[in-house]
Image (cartoon, rainbow, N blue to C red):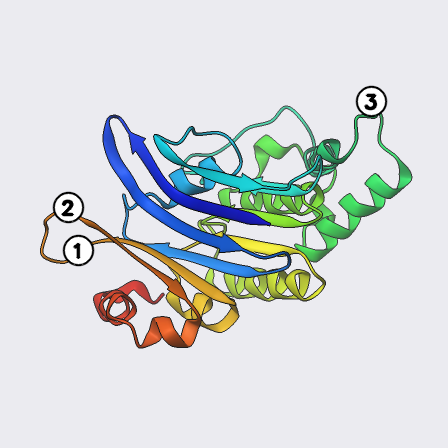
Amino acid sequence: MIEVKNLTMKYDARVVIDNLSFSMADGEYIAVLGENGSGKSTLAKAIVGLAEPASGSVRHDFKRGDVGYLPQLRDRTSFPATVSEVVLSGTLGASAKPFYSRSDKNAAADAMARLGISELAKRPFSELSGGQMRRVLIARTLCAGRRLLILDEPTAGLDPVASAELYELLAGINKNGVGVLIISHDTGAALRYADRILHLGIHADGDDAHCYFFGTPDEYASSEAGRRYIDAGGCD
């Protein structure tokens, strides 16, 4: 579904990804780990076409409505709409129709039920807490992607119980054939749920050279990158 080949990305003239290659199959669950500033969010933007490579390529076979993308959110986000309207808007990417079908409305209701926010349906989005907003935007993302969900730190702002429930939800969606590419600092969840782990990092000797790992959770746990990250507290 995705093939990244010799990808180099720059941010403010600084190389944040250097000559990265990996691939993702249909229905696969890939966790992207790494230190802050290692290019994880930039990689997600490159995959969905929001950032241009300095060199190399990102190839995919996405069609309209195939991908739901939740970017990293650091601040409160405000929409002049109710919760149900925000979630329902996620279905717009799957169709060029200027109206919502019954199946769209059913998909939105199902997504809200999965995230435990059905009782918030008529609440103004702007009045929600940060954690509630996060759940609403995740529900919207579920409506947007039929083949792949790309989630950048989706558990930020959620308490441990809500985070665990979200990981279980994503695992269930993945078992039904939807691919998941999740950027996270939660090594424990990555080891538990992912088919493969992509680690973006910088060499420990501080020479600013990029180092990458891509493999199964078992391979990651026994790798130098995995051991160093886990020992440094990367496991939430």
Image x and y of residue 207, in percent: 10, 49
Q: Residue at coordinates 33% horizontally, 35% vertically from top-left?
A: 9
Image x and y of residue 188, in percent: 41, 70
* Residue type beneath disc 1: His
Tell me the crowding category of disc 1: few under 14, some 14 to 19, or many 20 or more residues within 10 angstroms, Cα based.
few
* In the image, residue 193 above or below residue 65: below
* In the image, residue 188 above or below residue 118: below
Residue 208 badge? 2
* In the image, residue 183 above or below residue 129: below
Q: CA distance from mark 3 to mark 2?
A: 49 Å
Q: Are marks 1 and 2 in contact (CB under 8 Å)?
A: yes
Q: Residue at coordinates 54% horizontally, 45% vertically from top-left?
A: 134
Q: Quadrant of residue 14?
A: top left
The residue labelled by disc 3 is: 98
Would residue 32 be found to the left or right of residue 145 on screen? left
Q: Quadrant of residue 81?
A: top right
The residue labelled by disc 1 is: 203
Q: In the rendered structure, which disc, 1 or 2, sits on the residue that comes first in sequence?
A: 1
Image x and y of residue 208, in percent: 15, 46
Q: Are marks 3 and 2 in contact (CB under 8 Å)?
A: no
* Residue type beneath disc 2: Asp
Tell me the crowding category of disc 2: few under 14, some 14 to 19, or many 20 or more residues within 10 angstroms, Cα based.
few
